[in-house]
Image (cartoon, grey):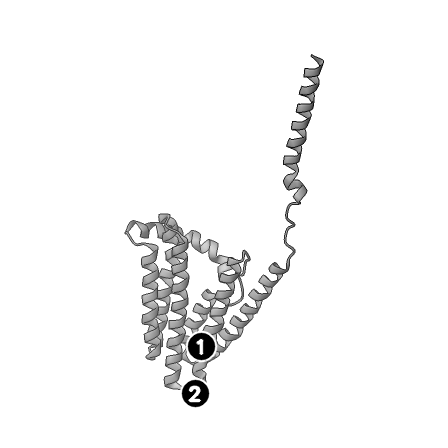
Amino acid sequence: MLDGRWKTDIERRLRPVGSDLSRTGISADHLTVLGLVMAVAAAVAIGNGALRAGVLLLAASALPDALDGAVAKATGTASPRGSFFDSVADRVSDSLLLGGVAWYLSGIDGGRIVLLPFAVLAVSTLISYQRAKAESLGFDARGGVMERAERIVALGLGLLFEWALIPVLWIMLVLTTFTAVQRFAKVWRQAGAPLPAPPPRATRWGGRRTARSRDRTWRHRTRSRRRSH
């Protein structure tokens, strides 16, 4: 939802920052790796109960993730390989962060509640797969009420207010599941639309037939002229 409404405006505002960073020799891949390292640190902090530090590291991991695209565009190095690397790094970061939350919950509560972060992770992975598969088929699966930006913000709020962490995780699970249904329905409608009809065979070969008929007419006229002479 945030990506759809403000992504273009955010990218426009970050473009000068990306240009400045590119002059320092920092590449988009460097920023992607930095964001991944910060996510590892955030997961370790959360798992050990340092939730406030986890929030700060979570915000720190989101910043390079927002800037790597701006640097790639500023340096003209945007490529499918970089996009692939960024997407994989995002999935790894999500797994680390929610794994850290599960680690933390196992230490303070235990029981089945530790499965809640993994349920959120499973559905989050599903909506990421939906988008990737839809785009490979030529469809659009973007959008939804709980995309990655919303999940990061919600998780940060849950970590900031410890008492709200478990309710926030339940809300994330419900809204992420709703997003998966939204994306499925969106792609289902696109895939069910009638395909454009292929060009008729007569049109395909019409050019050759016209050329042949013209050639026959020219030959007939030439023979008639020769006979008249």
Q: Is residue 85 above or below residue 203?
A: below
* Residue 113 x/y as whole percent: 45, 83
Q: Residue at x 42, y 62 (%)?
A: 87
Q: Quadrant of residue 54?
A: bottom left
Q: SS for tag 2?
A: helix
For the residue marked with disc 1, what is the amino acid?
Phe
Q: Residue at x 65, y 28 (%)?
A: 215
* Residue 130 x/y as whole percent: 52, 65
* Residue 74 marker: none
> For the view shown, which residue lies furthest in the front direction?
227
Question: Could you tell me if residue 11 is visible in this image?
Answer: yes
- Distance (Cα) linking label 1 and label 2: 13 Å
Is 62 positioned to the left or the right of 178 in the image?
left
Q: Earlier in the sequence, mark 1 or mark 2?
A: 2
Is 209 positioned to the left or the right of 150 in the image?
right
Q: Residue at x 43, y 68 (%)?
A: 152
Q: Which residue is mark 2?
A: 111
Quadrant location of the C terminus in the rendered image: top right
Q: SS for tag 1?
A: helix
Q: Which residue is mark 1?
A: 118
* Residue 155 x/y as whole percent: 43, 72
Question: Could you tell me if residue 1 is visible in this image?
Answer: no
For the residue marked with disc 2, what is the amino acid?
Gly
Is 159 positioned to the left or the right of 215 in the image?
left
Between 199 and 120, which is closer to the camera in this rendering?
Answer: 199
